[in-house]
Amino acid sequence: MFLRIDKLQVEMPAPTEPDPNAAAAVQELLGGRFGEMSTLMNYMYQSFNFRGRDKLRQYYALISNIATEELGHIELVAASINSLLNGPESAGDPATGTASYKRAFKDVRNVHHHIVMGHGAMAANAMGQPWRGDYVFNSGNLILDLLHNFFLENGARTHKLRVYELTDNPAARQMLGYLFVRGGVHAHAYALALEELTGVEMKKMLPIPKIENVALPESRPYEDRGFHRKLYRFSPDDYKDVAAVWHGQALDGSGPLEVVDGPPEGGDLAKLDGAADAFTPEYHPEEIYEMAQKLYQKAR
Amino acid sequence: MFLRIDKLQVEMPAPTEPDPNAAAAVQELLGGRFGEMSTLMNYMYQSFNFRGRDKLRQYYALISNIATEELGHIELVAASINSLLNGPESAGDPATGTASYKRAFKDVRNVHHHIVMGHGAMAANAMGQPWRGDYVFNSGNLILDLLHNFFLENGARTHKLRVYELTDNPAARQMLGYLFVRGGVHAHAYALALEELTGVEMKKMLPIPKIENVALPESRPYEDRGFHRKLYRFSPDDYKDVAAVWHGQALDGSGPLEVVDGPPEGGDLAKLDGAADAFTPEYHPEEIYEMAQKLYQKAR
Amino acid sequence: MFLRIDKLQVEMPAPTEPDPNAAAAVQELLGGRFGEMSTLMNYMYQSFNFRGRDKLRQYYALISNIATEELGHIELVAASINSLLNGPESAGDPATGTASYKRAFKDVRNVHHHIVMGHGAMAANAMGQPWRGDYVFNSGNLILDLLHNFFLENGARTHKLRVYELTDNPAARQMLGYLFVRGGVHAHAYALALEELTGVEMKKMLPIPKIENVALPESRPYEDRGFHRKLYRFSPDDYKDVAAVWHGQALDGSGPLEVVDGPPEGGDLAKLDGAADAFTPEYHPEEIYEMAQKLYQKAR
Amino acid sequence: MFLRIDKLQVEMPAPTEPDPNAAAAVQELLGGRFGEMSTLMNYMYQSFNFRGRDKLRQYYALISNIATEELGHIELVAASINSLLNGPESAGDPATGTASYKRAFKDVRNVHHHIVMGHGAMAANAMGQPWRGDYVFNSGNLILDLLHNFFLENGARTHKLRVYELTDNPAARQMLGYLFVRGGVHAHAYALALEELTGVEMKKMLPIPKIENVALPESRPYEDRGFHRKLYRFSPDDYKDVAAVWHGQALDGSGPLEVVDGPPEGGDLAKLDGAADAFTPEYHPEEIYEMAQKLYQKAR
Amino acid sequence: MFLRIDKLQVEMPAPTEPDPNAAAAVQELLGGRFGEMSTLMNYMYQSFNFRGRDKLRQYYALISNIATEELGHIELVAASINSLLNGPESAGDPATGTASYKRAFKDVRNVHHHIVMGHGAMAANAMGQPWRGDYVFNSGNLILDLLHNFFLENGARTHKLRVYELTDNPAARQMLGYLFVRGGVHAHAYALALEELTGVEMKKMLPIPKIENVALPESRPYEDRGFHRKLYRFSPDDYKDVAAVWHGQALDGSGPLEVVDGPPEGGDLAKLDGAADAFTPEYHPEEIYEMAQKLYQKAR
Amino acid sequence: MFLRIDKLQVEMPAPTEPDPNAAAAVQELLGGRFGEMSTLMNYMYQSFNFRGRDKLRQYYALISNIATEELGHIELVAASINSLLNGPESAGDPATGTASYKRAFKDVRNVHHHIVMGHGAMAANAMGQPWRGDYVFNSGNLILDLLHNFFLENGARTHKLRVYELTDNPAARQMLGYLFVRGGVHAHAYALALEELTGVEMKKMLPIPKIENVALPESRPYEDRGFHRKLYRFSPDDYKDVAAVWHGQALDGSGPLEVVDGPPEGGDLAKLDGAADAFTPEYHPEEIYEMAQKLYQKAR
């Protein structure tokens, strides 16, 4: 079972300008075949269905623990999309037949962001197509599943690099800079697991594509702080066996790999105001806020 | 972000006989439109996209916290499916051209359980159709989202009752008995939230269908222990504001509602052996076990 | 706009034995690519999007009117599926942990009939896959659309013949016998429309496959009564221009084609009792019946 | 079975400027999960599969009758989309290698409107994704189905409000103004049905979102004429039992609810000319018009 | 089984300017319901599943041989899409946080062309929806299958004409000009096959829509060279029985139909350079080229 | 472009008993995510979209050539499915209201084999779900695409092994025995290509799962004849550069790898009779055979 902490894994910049088409592109990294929903659910189901758990404990621990980190990743990408969709109140009002800001949404690629979601993140890809449960690969054969995971992380990285090229909005770039580094840890970890079991030095194939994270301005600060050497153990007391896989040297020779007991420090969630003109949380947000606060006081 | 504990939310009986068609039916409760993947992701995205978080804190806390409990529910239903698919080794062996036990899978409803998953749970419904991201409803309008959640929990209950009728395998029935009670808590909590904001006494509509949990032999023990009055707070320190919604009396008048700080005690995961004849984790499981244990010793 | 009459287009026999796999097969004729949902929606959208309505009035009238007949066909196939799913009450009761009749549903092909629908017809095909809006073909080019419709009717007939071979349950066979004849009228009408506009004698291609309706024991009575010569005008006052297409001789030389002003006499809908053990309409049907009747009396 | 009247339920303004992206947005209200195809087919299948029809007659009548009204709604939304796609003939001609107006379609969101549909409405949502049969919810449990319908109507209203904000084209706004009122009647009617059966005053939750129809300039005229108090009985002689649900006072206190015997007066369908450059109905429309008229004369 | 020749069926112009939205539109002709993937797979499966192959040999040969030609058509349409996506190197570089050309892709309709495909053709339609295996129609009834194929070719032609109107990029127009002629041959051939078996003169319905290929500037040169009279036999020695169907006169009276032994002369594939900024084939293309060439020399 | 030879790549045994559920299972190997449609179309699109073709010629040649071999594999798996569906004529006849053999199809898993396909192979998986174009992975990054292909071949092998366990029908087993060997060649070839470009010895990971082909009774004869060392060049004159990748020693040390110029000898297609009771090719097959033969004689 799981616990939740009301923080993001990393600090994110405050929202700036809305950019719906950038938000649509970032959706690929959430709900696309190689998005965080996929990495999350692939590892989650692999942990649920793991056979020989006690005898293969380090691999069970590794997959289970990375799955938990991915929960924070869907949260982080969703936060980035929310920032890209967050905008100034419209001058318009349905009650006067006008709605000027929202009207700009008519021509965006993913109009579901407005009509269906009220300007929030969807479980869908960059074309608005829903994430599908058959994106989960879980053959039960340990080597094949690890090979898949190694491939999946590299496919995910390629898609992230291409989304990176489409926008320089800070809400997208900060998230990307962080995830290039964390995805790099995952790819490295699966490479180590495969190498142990097969003798094949998968890590020599990294990075795919052949551009180092450190070359990307938004990733460099995280690499400088050694995030690429750290595997966080996202659990109060369990999954300690990850250390039996995650040890040795960093790929860039910058120092030893280390298991960090517990999650990263993290950052606060952005405060997103309601939008009367999207009816989120209501047409008259102040009224519902007031009522909620009154009820809250009463209940204490 | 999230932490993970290597336990199920409740103790489960040991697997008995394999029953692939029952496993297929239980899939509806995992990957169907009203399955746990849906409750999980509906509440998860609603928490990601929540607007006016600080002013509507008790509703944010409620939705976020139930989402976290649902993570444990997909784990629990997946464990039940694994039990239903777990079986004795086949007398057959591909290398001799025979594979008697597996051959029985030819006529089952969901042959993907064998071919694709190696006898594990899928992110799919009872007909083997993948879970879809557009099962997530999140309008951003708080009242509409709460109304949806109330409806969703009752739809989920109806489907569970009908799956209950299809099998009396203990691995399915224990899971169902527990989830009728927990789902009941969620429906009740959403009813309370709606009642506060609209004055409409939704809780008078419960239960849907009109059969009490306590009437179901596998739920009664949990009701007797008061599980239907407890909202667990699945977090080290956050989401305490759930108490501003979850208070008052139980629907059956058995006592006051209470918020429990922390998760339930839980139960151990079943030990599932590898199956050579499904190649999970390998064709010669003992070889890979031995190697893994050697590597494990070396790494310590 | 539309009006509704609380009758089926034809009398149907009372339900006999439940036969879930036959019900599943008949679903193809409702929600499959060549099912009645498809013929309905193809002609409906073609009528909505028709260009040059006044100058091509006989074709507009023909398509619009057949669309309306198809509404009665989805109703008829759904009634047939309901009959095939209708069964004796189970001896079991969830409250005692038993549910013997429903348990038989565990092994059927379409378990959604039980879990999701409570034993009713779905908008899905014989494999339980949902009907899709892109089954609608509507190019806007009149000749291409008529050619499509001619093809669609013949594809539908082929699928019906194959479902006919799978079951001899009277609830399925009566519906099939009737629809072979009505589908024959539609294919003939589209052939006449095409022949007028292109000079190509499409009707010489009929029937496809080369087995006459009159050879099928359940169709013969309808042919004997001349149903294959009649185009019903399903409208109080409109679409009279169908007569400009539907005239001439029957394909079997049995007499002149005729337009009937108004719908056929039709037959009553079967009385389907509630099923406590499917919670339809409720777990204690008698209670809800009683309450409804009290409310009904009060409201009069 | 059904009859058809060759009129829309309400008068619509003549088409003005084409606006393909507005047409694409309006598609959500036709083929989206909360579009008119969904309300139509939900109620239609609920009426087909209704159990205990005679004992629960007022609910059967209500659902059956609203289903029939929804047939007119898919027609109305389709007419609005046709208006938004209707445009001046292109100066271009494929035969000269030019096609200037159509070329503008290259950059629209839903290019299928041109390529596949020849500028007509599709059974798809605002992202061009086809409507799906599993959007139909029909549990067979009466209370759950009514709760769903109440939720569905409010979800539909929220989506309509957001589409309203995207365009002020009269062809869209008139349709929306009318449907806000009719949808309000349906939500109210389902609330009354639920209240009778459960005692829960659902109607106090309306409207969702909290903006009154009367505040919307295009709805006000219909409210002024009392359309929000009228339930039309779309049948020559049946479904009279709706009156046992639809009685009492309007939510705005403006007077008593009333059942109108028969459909509204309605309005004429727009005359949509053929478009040579979309080959609808043909490349040389005049030729096919002339031939059709000649055939028409001959057949009379 | 199959052989491959490293040439396109026809010469194509060199790529000019990139035009991503035109590329997206052309996708309909590759992965849409009426695209080349559909014609290919329809005829391919019809040839795989053909019953009575030796007694109906001319029809088997015809369908099998046209299927083989369609393989070249998916290749040709893909080449056209590649041309439309091919562009100048970006001045930007991820390593400097800039990527100017690629950023323009943020607003295109099909952003998967960039993120997922690295600027190559997809097995998807103009809306980015994947081609589906159920686009294959194969009833096994010979007349119904031939009727379908005749319809399919004409639907494909209609879609092609509408894509033609959307762009005058030479890479699209040359492909279209050629395929109008080849598709015309296929429609004609299926018409002849149907006419033989049923006596119905389907060919009198052609062309649909009523615009002759010869009227289209890009098709005329191919018609002038008689391509519309030639059925290529795409096989070293087999399928000679096509001649039993493909004989008689061209529809335009320009001369006799003829079977050409072997494929057309064809044209070279365009040389598409790698794009460092799409990481295709790599971030530093020159490095991988050099390595590959070294390995190539060594291996000879 | 492509040529076709009217032979299978290998001889297949004559059909024996029909086994519809085995046929359904084998569908996974044709239309599943890891089926032959997927290997075919992955490599086909990778060859269409290849960048830097001349500088990376050995990889272009390898992928293009394996794609061509896969065309023969979809043909082979389809032939196997046809064998498993081929059966004795029914004693029944629709015209007498009886159809005994076909009635057995009512209870099979994939009833579309009867209703939709007339007992032929579908482009769908073992659950009857259509193959989808987004099963194609083609990032354009050469190393990532090769890594994917290596993974794909091993996933395909795992699924084949599990289908192998489900049936010992000779029509399935012979096909499987052959494809284990050919798939092994492809996995080996992609491993070699990756090793050249990255230095990582992927071939040491083979076989996945850890059961040698030679251990499978139906594969051994092909291994004995050295099929696992041969890469066929499926082209009259092109793709000779495959030899720059495919050289060195067999994995089992049995001898050198070799490129064979041209396709294997192959085997004849099975003669499948028409089935009157499936209307394939017609209800009275003899009539259509006779007519076709008459026409054939006349045309010569």
Image (cartoon, coloured by chain):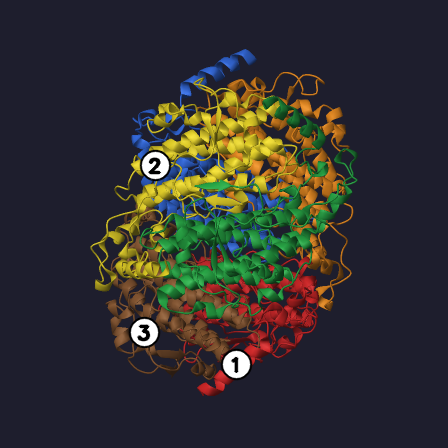
Chain colours: A brown, B red, C orange, D blue, E yellow, F green
Front residue of E264/B215: it is E264
Amino acid marked by disc 1: Met
Q: Chain of mark 3?
A: A
Determine whether D238 is above or below A156 in the image: above
Q: Are marks 2 and 3 on the same chain?
A: no
Mark 3 and mark 1: span between their CA atoms?
Answer: 41 Å
Q: Secondary structure at mark 1?
A: helix
Q: Are marks 2 and 1 on the same chain?
A: no
Q: Residues within 10 Å of mark 2 (few under 14, many from 20)?
A: some
Kindly identify which residue carries mark 1: B291
Quadrant in the picture for the N terminus of chain B: bottom left
Any part of residue C284 in sight: no
Is residue F267 among the parts visible in the rendering? Answer: yes
Identify the amino acid type marked 2. Answer: Glu
**Residue B70 coordinates in the image, percent (x, y):** 51, 69
Name the image quarter holding the C terminus of chain B. Answer: bottom left
Secondary structure at badge 2 equals loop
Q: Which residue is mark 2?
A: E11
